[in-house]
């Protein structure tokens, strides 16, 4: 059975969402970072970086949530994995785009607004992150303006991966209303039944 190591409230969430969409049996192995579970030798043997999530599927050990999801979609989730090579390349492209172009700014806002003591907050960092997100959201708005999903008419692993990044937007109260296509798409993706089953 597939094992996912992590917690629901971590990047493991996107892997659990993918597994729920695919419908294959899996086990969530809790790794509590606050208790140092990630530093134990048995976990470091799976992910020497000491971070969650990690996956074990038979003899395969894999870390990095996007890599895990692309693997799961390709091996098990035929409905999530595009049939043609161009679609597959675009699924990888958008997944990387989500982490490299969007996630870092949402995390900056999350850390500053929720985890930084008042006397150490840097409003300029939040402002810079919001400004940077504006140009990225313009790109995404353009992609979604004429199609319901990133790659066309069908929900794929690209949508799941990028929408999982945008799950942080509501936590930091980032308003997506100025980007109507993006907002509709994010809301639709995040409200899918498969995701609701892991919340």
Image (cartoon, rainbow, N blue to C red):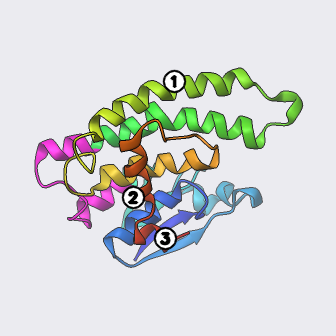
Examine the image and state in which quarter residue 34 appears.
bottom right
Circles 1 and 3, Cβ within 8 Å, touching? The answer is no
* Camera-side mark, 1 or 2: 2
Examine the image and state in which quarter residue 37 appears.
bottom right
Circles 3 and 2, Cβ within 8 Å, touching? The answer is no
Q: Is 137 or 91 nearer to us in this picture?
A: 137
Which residue is tagged 1?
132
- Residue numbers of the magenta segment: 69-91
Q: Residue 56 location, x and y as percent?
A: 43, 65
Q: Rate crowding at label 3 as few (under 14), some (14 to 19) or many (20 or more) other CA atoms within 10 Å.
A: few
Instruction: Name the N-terminal-most of marks 3 and 2.
Output: 2
Q: Residue 171 location, x and y as percent?
A: 63, 49
Q: Is residue 183 above or below residue 68?
A: above
**Residue at screen point 43% across, 24% down:** 135
Q: Is 163 or 80 nearer to us in this picture?
A: 163
- Direction from residue 63 to residue 143 in the image, left or right: left
Which residue is tagged 3?
196
Instruction: Please indicate, yes or no, whether residue 66 appears anywhere in the rendered image.
Output: no
Which residue is tagged 2?
188
Residue at disc 2, secondary structure: helix
Q: Is residue 141 above or below residue 151?
A: above
Residue at disc 3, secondary structure: helix
Question: Is residue 87 located in the magenta-colored stretch of the structure?
Answer: yes
Q: Is 193 or 52 nearer to us in this picture?
A: 193
């Amino acid at each position: 059975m597939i094992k996912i190591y992590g917690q629901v409230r971590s990047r493991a969430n996107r892997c659990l969402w993918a597994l729920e969409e695919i419908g294959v049996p899996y086990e969530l192995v809790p790794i509590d970072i606050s208790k140092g579970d990630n530093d134990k030798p048995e976990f470091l043997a799976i992910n020497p970086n000491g971070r969650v999530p990690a996956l074990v599927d038979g003899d395969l050990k894999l870390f990095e949530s996007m890599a895990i999801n692309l693997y799961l979609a390709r091996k098990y989730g035929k409905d999530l994995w595009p049939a043609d090579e161009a679609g597959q390349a675009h699924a990888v492209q958008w997944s990387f785009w989500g982490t490299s172009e969007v996630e870092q700014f949402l995390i900056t806002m999350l850390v500053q607004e929720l985890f930084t003591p008042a006397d150490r907050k840097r409003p300029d960092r939040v402002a810079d992150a919001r400004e940077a997100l504006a140009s990225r959201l313009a790109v995404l708005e353009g992609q979604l303006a004429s199609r319901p999903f990133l790659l066309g008419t069908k929900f794929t692993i690209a949508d799941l991966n990028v929408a999982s990044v945008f799950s942080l937007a509501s936590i930091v109260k980032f308003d997506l209303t100025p980007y109507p296509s993006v907002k509709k798409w994010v809301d639709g993706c995040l409200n899918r039944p498969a995701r609701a089953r892991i919340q």
